[in-house]
Every structure is written in C-alpha cells, then in structure tokens.
Image (tube, helix red, strand yellow):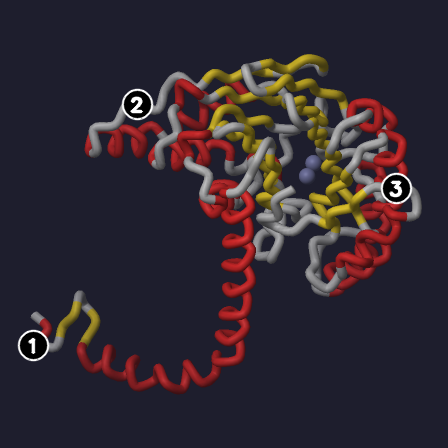
Amino acid sequence: MGDKGETGGLSRRALLAGMAATPALTAAVAPAAAQAINCDATTEAAEARCRAALKDARGTKLVLLGTGAGPVPGRTRRMTSHVMLHDGAAYVVDCGLGVTNQFARTGIPFKSVRSIYITHHHPDHNIEYGPFLVIGWIQGMQPSNVHAFGPPPLTEMTRDYLRSAKVTIDFWAEDLKMNPLIGIDVHDLPTPGPVMRDDNVAVTSVLVEHPPVKPAYGYRFDFADRSIAFSGDTVPLEVVARMARGADVLVHEAMYLPALEKYIRAQIAKGRPVSFDAFMAHMNADHSPVEAVGRIAQEAGVKTLVLSYLTPAVDSITDATWRAPAAKHFKGEIVVGHDLTVV
Ligand SMILES: [Zn+2]
Ligand SMILES: [Zn+2]
C-alpha cells in the first residue's frame, strides 16, 4: 500500500510535506518544550520523595494527592484529594479530577483501597469518583472490600455511574476474565455524626457551611496512633475547631485574598463572564481566608496545620506568603500543601 503512495487515505506527498515542516515546528516550540522538561523533573522528584516517605513509614501517613482549589484543570496543583495509609489500608478523601493518577503515583497498590469519603457534591470533589472505581478495579482494587461514604445521593450516583460504564466494564471483565465490578458498599450520609468504624479507624463528620451545597461535611479520622481532621470546603467555623480539638493534624482549605483579587481581575479582563463583586461575595460566603484558618487551628490545639485546597492555586505565591497569615495565630507546625507531600 505504502509503495503506491497512500497511507490510510493520506497521500505520500502530503506526508512528506508534513515531515519537511517538522524541524521549523520543533524550533518554534523549543522554549515551551524546555519548560515542560523542568516541570516533569519537579513532579518526578515529588513522586520519588513520596514513595520513599511511604516506604519507610511507621504508623499512619497522610498524602496530599491534589492541593488546588476549585474545578480548574491544567495547573501544577491538581484538584482536591487526599489519602491516608494505615497498616496497608488506604482511606481516600475526595475525588477531584486527577485522583486516580495521583493515587497511582504514590505507589500505594489499588488493592489497599478500603474506603472513600466525599465531603460534598461539587465537581472538584467528586468528578473522578466513578472513574477511580473503574480504573482502580482494573488495577487490582477489590470492589467488595471498598466502602464509600458521602452526602446523598451518593448511592444513586454510584449506581448511575456504574450503569453508564457497564458496556466498557463488561468488555473488560469478559476479555480478561476478571471478577465483576460489583459489591461496593455505599452509604449516604444525610446527617452529620459517627460515619463508620473498622479495625483501623473511627470516622465522624460535622456539618460545615458552604452554601448552597447541603449537606457539606468535614471529617475526622481517629486512628490508634494519629488523628487527622479535614475541614472540607467551608467558611471559618467553630464547629471545625471543635471537631479537630486535640487532633494531630488539621487539613484546612485556605484562600489568600490579595492574590485572589488580582487573579480574578485578570480572569475578568480575559473575558471570564463574572463580576468582581459577585465572585468575591461567593468566595467570602463559602471559603476561609488563611489568617482565619490559623485562628481555627490554634483554637483546635492541633499539632500540625496542613494548608491544602489553596485559592488561588497559582505557583507564584510562595510558601512563606501562605504561611505568614496563619502563623499570626497558630503556633504549631504549618505545612503548605504541595501535591504528593507526605505528612
Ligand atoms: Zn471545592
Ligand atoms: Zn465546594
């Protein structure tokens, strides 16, 4: 076929012309390519550090899988998700876009997944929940060992997602003689309070304030050796401080207002169809300025405050800039979240 000058409908001449054009194209994009290599080097280093930290781990570890706020793709910081690892069992909190890939990069086997918690039904917290189940299953997750918890209608969402993916799941199961993807134990949590207890951990939830989303939860995980609390998306709340009281780690969302104002003004200038006042009113009604987060952590008396779910998730804000407002009030350790950091 190729000898006759045809390759799948594309003439040989067109193909050769395309190839001749390639060097010019390469030269034109060279600076961007160089940048991409730097970026990969950074993420590979983060992955190597993460794997090393988990390999030598004693006791419960927390891995920040995605530390960016909001449903925004294409950033260094991925959408929100976290995993705690205790004695070979993995507990996942939120499934923003990228959770499956980030989980894989930690080196934690998918068969370790024991339970999944969704804080609330915004897309940056649940959009990859279904795909995590399907790809996780292909990679060794045991569906009948997995429990999922979240606000209603999580049961219905799980069923609907798996139904929508039935054809592709069945092709795979039949072809590779796999056990079917069934038996995930899903629990709707219509009210806050005790969530579950297994041989590793007791989990409780509190209602946070994140209008108009109802309910939206924060979660606390009490392992034998360590307690870890998550604010979820919320304004600064007394109830989060109470939930986290005496915990080792509080993972709290944080926004840095001066940079956020600049960021949204630039977005509006580029044509994003939102008014500055409406946007800021929404942010102030739904999220927590980093200085207030320091106050909550101090009130809770935690050892370590982890700033994760950062707004705006732009790389130009230094760790010191994030840390300083929280440190005005909180005297313990402050970790500024980066993807694949192990705490
Ligand atoms: Zn969110
Ligand atoms: Zn949200």
Quadrant for ligand 1 reads top right
Nearer to us in this view, 207 or 110: 110
Position of 276 relative to 30 (above/below): above
Position of 106 relative to 151 (above/below): below
Which percent across, then down, holds residue 224?
Answer: 64, 21
Which percent across, then down, holds residue 12?
Answer: 18, 78
Q: Quadrant of residue 227?
A: top right
Provide the residue designation for mark 1. Answer: 3
What residue is shown at x 25% (from left), y 27% (from top)?
178
Comes first in the chain, label 1 or label 2: 1
Comes first in the chain, label 3 or label 2: 2
Provide the residue designation for mark 3. Answer: 330
Q: CA distance from mark 3 to mark 2?
A: 49 Å
Quadrant assignment for the N terminus: bottom left
Q: CA distance from mark 1 to mark 2?
A: 47 Å
Q: Nearer the viewer, mark 1 or mark 3?
A: 3
What residue is shown at x 64% (from left), y 34% (from top)?
122
